Amino acid sequence: MSALGHELTHDHAHDHHHKETFITKYIFSTDHKMIAKQYLVTGVIMGVIGIAMSLLFRIQIAWPEESFKVFSWLLGDEFAPGGVMRNDIYLALVTIHGTIMVFFVLTAGLSGTFSNLLIPLQLGARDMASGFINMLSYWIFFLSCAIMISSLFVESGPASAGWTIYPPLSALPQAIPGSGTGMTLWLISMALFIAQSLMGSLNYVVTILNLRTKGMTMTRMPLTIWALFVTAIVGIVSFPVLLSAALLLIMDRSFGTSFFLSDIYLAGEVLHYQGGSPVLFEHLFWFLGHPEVYLVILPAMGITSEVISANARKPIFGYRAMITSLLAIAFLSTIVWGHHMFVSGMNPFLGSVFTFTTLLIAIPSAVKAFNYITTLWKGNLQMNTGMLFSIGFVSTFISGGLTGIILGDSTLDINVHDTYFVVAHFHLVMGISALYGMFAGIYHWYPKMFGRMMNKNLGYIHFWVTAVCAYGVFLPMHFIGMAGLPRRYYTNSAFPLFDDMVDVNIIITMFALVGAAFQLLFLWNFFYSMFYGKKAPQNPWRATTLEWTTPVEHIHGNWPGAIPEVHRWPYDYSKPGYEEDFVPQTTPLREGEKDGGHH
Amino acid sequence: MTSLLIIVIVALLGIAVWQLTKIFDLTQSKHQLGEEYRSEVATDKDNSINGYLMFGFLAFIYILTIYCCVKWGYMPLLDNAASEHGKDVDQLMWITLAVIFFVQAVTQFLLHYFAFIYRGKKDRKAVFYADNDKLEFAWTIIPVIVLSGLILYGLYAWNNIMHYDEEEEVMYVEVYAKQFGWDFRYGGDDNVLGKANVRFIEGINVVGVDMSDPNAQDDVMSKELRLPVGKKVVLKMRSQDVLHSAYFPHFRAQMNTVPGMVTQFIMTPSVTTADMRERQEIVDKVNKINDVRNERSKTLIAKGEEGLTPYTFDYILLCNKICGRSHYNMQAKVIVETPEEFNSWLKDQPKLGKQVAEEKAAATAPEVEIQPVIEIPVTAPEMEIVVDSTAVVAQVIK
């Protein structure tokens, strides 16, 4: 029975006194708070696997073709004979690393966690519109993870054509071994992933539109919800296109069709394919692929708005402008995909169109960055770890976003496309900025999720070391990219032209190793505090939003009595006329008091 | 055996987690709100320390950026473009970098400075300042103006690069990519490339030229790309198997090679290899590279292996789209020389028509059985940009 059903029949809590078993509480729960935690833990574990892979190929790139015990140990004798990584396994590692990080960690782990946790809590709903579909979406996600991991153990190797899996390379096992069984498993895993993503997104949209409590108008929703709302809509629009690309690819691989293949001579023979085009795949892939990266950054932006505002003890600057920017970014993100394809051989006229739309999207992004900075101005900044990561989010979003202006200009992209310049750009905005957003969310909402506080000092060390290492890895990378060093190269030693970049690659790898090592500190803090962290009060950060009005002990239905009514917007921090420096959304307006940012 | 062990370990871990969560439930006593949690909330002292660290971090960002520019700034290809359009690309790059560095410097400063100067203090109250439409307008319109300028310049340059006048005198050269190397084909005296399709690949005809096309007889094959300086060349690109990308960093040129399609890139080389070798920046870079190579040679020789040959500058073609196991070693030399040198080289090269005929003559196997295969009329795609590859009438040659 859905939470919605209960809502209509009786208005109080679900203290049904039915004994919850381990299975119904922790495994097959329909409670959005438990599902959020499931997404989070799964996302964190996938993140650990993804980072481990990146360390392996970074070691290979810094000290090419050397033998390492860790390669023998982790990759085995087939994939790393004599401890030397095989050249196609390098490509497999970068492929799976990219796939895991973009989809499993930064999409499912980020919006899966925070959409599930915050949408009902911040809107005043008992649960998601359908708890059953929500539970199903998590378990399909889990299955998708399991299949992706299983592809690592296939004899011919996991998918190796890059996370972008362009055919013909990804369609033909003769072109690279990983395009055999490994690629098949990848496609199955991703089909399931897309299904769970769509299920989740539908749930989020319906809940946001229909289950807001009394007084919670759209313009009284926290920016986090706006961001998650827009993310869900963009996901619904774009993920099905990737599914279609995957289905067509499956047909080309297994059913003899030629959607993406034509005129191929491989392994000494002419293949039968006729009439298809790899460029079609690129269009279909990037129609999702570009919005996908905004699906990654938008929740992080929403989280940052909340965390910065609560910790600055100030309203977020430009609430309506922020909403408009979110909508503009969401819309524009669907019409810029061709900037990944400037040198694909597509009609140059398209290049002009996509340059134009891509540089347009810089504008709402800039507006948001300026608004964050102005929120800090004349604030009273509480430097909790979540706040540090939110400030770090703005810093790295600006750094990474600015280089997008070069990549989005077709003329300039000619020289830096598929070089380390691109790698530096997208890692700064996704791998660092969005990740910081995720960390900020974890540190900020940990007391709500687990009823305990994370250790403050460990959080500080985690942030500062990560911040230094993050820039240490990716700032130098821009330079070797601009020097023409292509990405996805097993080793740079084949070209004397790149011999003077050896020391840069070593420095990058060193920073990466240190940075990754210090994530262990976060993992310790995260798992240890669940059991032994200091017990959290109901509202440790003294925030105004509804989630902090629920009891610390989780109950189904979130509030023990009636759902609170909302009377004001969520950003009444340091409002003149109030003694406390925050006014919860549930506090009624006084006589003559105006709602919103004016007083 | 190992797999069994792994399964057992995973199962045990699962049981451990299950039991741990049970213990967790038991340890959940009735919630008592004490003040202990305050130790995990930021105090004024924390705010102060982190505020100072924020400002210090700003210095770190600035210093790291400057260090990178000083130490590795000679590397990026921002100067010494070897093609006519390259100068436009470099200029646009410089302007864009100037804008980016300026914005970066200002915004990072404001962000970290505010984080420092407004660090939380118990007796401070934040200012309730929620919006300012004038400010929003200002910082919307300024990026619009700046970006419009960049867009317009970029589109102008892009149009110049991507289009050429049909009336212009150009030379056609085919760039043919395959796992894992490059082949080049010149149109020869008639400057027309013979029609081609992978179905015609045979023996010395490695790129599948349709030898029944009269234009194909004088085509010239090469393993290096030689170009005359100052002459506009239209590089027609094909791929044999998977996506590759013809990347000529010095010429600011790149275009994917797509199986089933002909793509192209147009450029005019403007500096000969010989001249480029004399330029000071190139000399410096070559010296730096050779320093590294010498160091490495020492270690190799000590191990009893051969040392590395010293590097002399050459233009280069690299593959820049993931294409398989040896993607990292798919290279070809590009040589730009004077028109006289180029013409004399081209004159000395064997013509494809003659090479194919000689090969056929050398193969003394019974011919008649093979002939019918060649006689099947097949139309090959025109050597233009073919978006519709269904123009090829395919015959599976079995």
Image (cartoon, coloured by chain):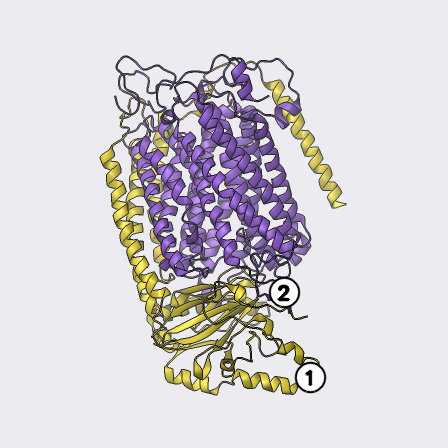
Chain colours: A purple, B yellow
Q: Is A503 above or below relative to A29?
A: below
Q: Secondary structure at mark 2?
A: loop
Rendered residue at 41%/36% (across/down): A389
**Residue A581 occupies quadrant:** top left
**Is A513 placed left or right of B73 in the picture?**
right
Residue B385 in the image, given as x and y percentages of width and height:
45, 67
Classify residue B92 by image quadrant: bottom left
Any part of residue A409 in sight:
no
Q: For the view shown, which residue lies furthest in the left direction?
A: B134
- Residue at the (69%, 86%) spot, across then down: B364
Task: Characterize the local packing of mark 1: few (<14), some (14-19) or many (20 or more) Cα atoms within 10 angstroms.
Answer: few
- Give residue A561's position: percent from left, percent from top: 49, 12
- Residue at mark 2 to residue at mark 1: CA–CA distance: 25 Å
Q: Residue at x 50, y 27 (%)?
A: A117
* Residue hosting label 2: A271
Where in the figure is residue A96, as x and y percent of width and height? 57, 48
State the quadrant of the N terminus of chain B. Answer: top right
Q: Amino acid at mark 1?
A: Glu
Q: Chain of mark 2?
A: A
Question: Are the residues flagged by discs 2 and 1 from a single subunit?
Answer: no
